[in-house]
Amino acid sequence: MKTLPFLATLLFCTHAFAMGGSAPGGPLYDETTRCKDLPANLRESFFQTFREDVASSGSSETRIQNYMRILGYAPRESSGYTLAANDEMPRTIEERQRGLTGQEVYIDRVWLDNKHWKKSNSVKASLESYRVIYGRESSTYTLKNREFMSHGRLFRRGETVSKFTIHRSTSVGLIQVSADQLGRGNTRAYLASLVRLAQTDPNAAATACLTRLYFSDSPSQVARELNTLARSCTPGTTSDSDVLCFDKWTALCPAFNIRLGLLLPDAYFAQKTKDKSAPQCESEFRKIAASL
């Protein structure tokens, strides 16, 4: 376990991220949005990751601004649903006219996972949905993220479902990162350490990955799923199976998704949204930094 904070520190020290630029579809939230309006588990996962970074390598204005920046993108990228995925490839003229990329919506699965969202104030996934969405070798189902978490209304039903292809540019998870970004910083070593941990101590891996924050299944089921994944494939970019394995890890391990997302410049998100998202939770990040 002691290797994980060290690797996470290396991850950020080896990358100088670029800010600025603009980013496809209007912003999900307007200027009245507040940090408290975000899903509770989305906020907490960013706060926990930030605490680890500050505790291991100190706080800085750059680090605070970067966390605020990426948390601002997360709601529009995934609506806080860790299983979200998008292959970014327009399919039909109609979809292009509607501004859609790749697919329509796999909305029933989100609805089933989050029928009681208002009670918990968290956007949860289920392992059943994980297996449905990521259970195919060459194609899967997806969500169109930006349409269904606006001003407190999380779900719209009745959208169509279409398949999409797993490839190096398929965007996955909270921050919608893709396998072709795996070379940033020390992400390969960090992910490899998580895989090894899941093989030997899946409960510790579930903690390090923050998986339990995002799944409604029991802790033992979550740990077992991570152990199964760690023993079944190797995440990477060389083959389709490697990429699918990366996508599964990115969906099941929100902490890895967040850390890779923190290395991405605004230009990465500009490929998908024309408007830059507002940074979020400044006062909370500053309170955490001051307390450590």
Image: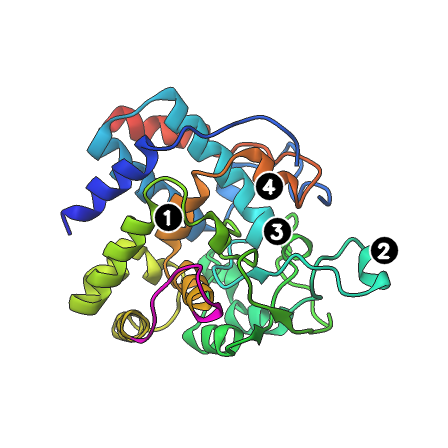
For label 2, the SS is helix
Whichever of callouts 2 and 4 sits on the residue coming sooner in the sequence is 2
- 220 on left or right of 119: left
The residue segment tinted magenta is: 232-241
Say whether residue 239 is magenta.
yes
Identify the residue at image location x=32%, y=55%: 210
Q: Which numbered marker is on residue 269?
A: 4
Name which of mark 2 and mark 3 comes first in the sequence.
Answer: 2
Q: Nearer the viewer, mark 3 or mark 4?
A: 4
Q: Quadrant of residue 91?
A: bottom right
Instruction: Specify the farthest residue to the top.
Output: 61
Amino acid type of disc 3? Gly
Label 1 or label 4, whichever lies nearer to me, is: 4
Cα gap from disc 1 to disc 4, whole angstroms: 21 Å
| Residue where numbered disc 2 is placed | 97
How far apart marks 2 and 3 lie (CA) works out to 27 Å
Regarding residue 174, the answer to whether it shows in the image is no
Label 3 vs 4, first from the N-terminus: 3
Does residue 140 appear left or right of residue 188 in this picture? right
Checking the image for residue 152, the label placed there is 3
